[in-house]
Amino acid sequence: MDNSFPLSGFGSAALHAGHQQDPMYAHVTPIYASSTFVYDEAEQGMRRFSGEEEGYIYSRWGNPNFTEAEKKIAALEAFGLKDKNGNPLQLKALLHASGMAALSTLMMGNLKQGDKILSHYSLYSGLEELITKILPPFGVQSIITDLRDLNKAEQAIKENPEIKLMHLETPANPTLQCVDIEALTKLAKTKNILVSVDNTFATPYLQQPFRFGVDFVFHSTTKFLNGHGTAIGGVLIGNDIEKMKAGITKTHRILGGNSNPFDAFLLTQGLKTLELRMQRHCSNAITVADFLANHAAIEKVNYNGLTTHPDHAVAKKQMKHPGAMMSFELKKGKQGGIDFMNKLKMCICTVSLGTAETILSHPASMTHYHIPKEEKEKYGITDGLIRLSVGLENVEDILGDFNQALS
Ligand SMILES: Cc1ncc(COP(=O)(O)O)c(C=O)c1O
């Protein structure tokens, strides 16, 4: 594509952004399965190492398949946004081997001994373990509170001047709680606290946190961005280009959580259809949420699109659509949930989310199994809770399968 052509739609950007003409004229960027890259002459290698000349060196440091996915994701997170001077917002993304690898770069690249992280209590369990078990022996502590209450956030910041990073996950896993990105970022900026947002559940199609002045956005690309459940991956995107190119890139390269050409290739193919997939995921999800909310066997549905969800207003303010994730409880509790999942004939019982197929999991015994029961219940993760990622099937089939499994 001629880069001077102004793409007016998110779907077009998802297809074309980040693509570079292949030197062999392949239409789709081939998989560059090469650990290292060669130079025309030794001096060129030296110029590449010193940064004087752009070019690939070694695939832990960069690879054409990573670049295509990184540029596409950065273009989508920045789509339609402007910087302080009214110019198109510039972002830099770094692709990682997994979401957890990208979160590790975020923490290790920004924090030092004595610093603290402030976060909300409904969090992806791997991150919760990273900040409460892995980081404390290195002198980095966390304060986990209810960030839906701005007074609690303000109080935590006042009492802990060591807070250097506020990490938000919204909507959060698996309760679909939402925090107010704009209000919390405003508060954090009064004390120069960095703000990062886990945008995995929403994707840039539904929510663009850089609109509110956050410093970093993170995704587990394993989920909706890949969209087909074919590769693990993570991406860290930042708006301070110099910092991303220097300290954050250094941390990423040294920790070694790089992606690989095949997974990056699969991610790029998935990203191309993000807009279309999200539209179908979302329209199916609304219908499924209404069906569940009105079914006699269901006790409770957590879905931001329902006016009964406590964070409906916040979700509406910052998201284009409430998305395709929800969780629900059956009146018959845990056993009712197990019986329901075992009776499903089309929808699939597995962890993860954002795949083309509708998938369901049981957080209390799967992703959040290590958290003590009382704590889980405090966070709304009851024994009967089922997490649902609504897929791309014809919605009548999802309803039909649920209906027969609930009867
Ligand atoms: C919201 C969220 N953040 C982060 C992660 C971690 O990503 P990964 O499994 O790709 O390492 C997950 C994984 O389930 C997640 O759901």
Image: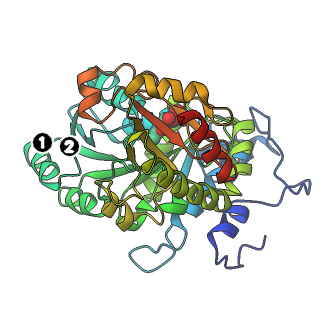
Query: How was this image coloured?
Result: rainbow
Say which mark, if any, is on residue 46: none
Q: Nearer the viewer, residue 203 or 279?
A: 279
At label 1, the amino acid type is: Asn
Task: Give the residue number, with chain letter if any, for mark 2.
Answer: 163
- From what the image shows, is residue 200 above or below residue 183? above
Q: Nearer the viewer, residue 349 or 126?
A: 349
Image quarter for residue 98? Answer: top right
Looking at the image, can residue 101 be seen? no
Q: Are marks 1 and 2 in contact (CB under 8 Å)?
A: yes
Q: Secondary structure at mark 1?
A: loop
Q: Nearer the viewer, residue 26 or 76?
A: 76
Q: Nearer the viewer, residue 139 or 235?
A: 235
- At 17% from the left and 50% from the top, the residue drawn is 153
- At 91% from the left and 57% from the top, the residue drawn is 25
Image quarter for residue 264? Answer: top right
Image quadrant where one finds the C terminus:
top right
Horizontal side of residue 379 vs 1, given as left or right = left
Task: Give the residue number, with chain letter if any, for mark 1.
Answer: 160
Horizontal side of residue 213 vs 60, given as left or right = left
- At 72% from the left and 79% from the top, the residue drawn is 5
Looking at the image, can residue 135 be seen? yes
Image quadrant where one finds the N terminus:
bottom right
Q: Secondary structure at mark 2?
A: strand
At label 2, the amino acid type is: Ile
- What percent of the width, then of the height, locates residue 359? 59, 37
- What percent of the width, then of the height, locates residue 363? 43, 29
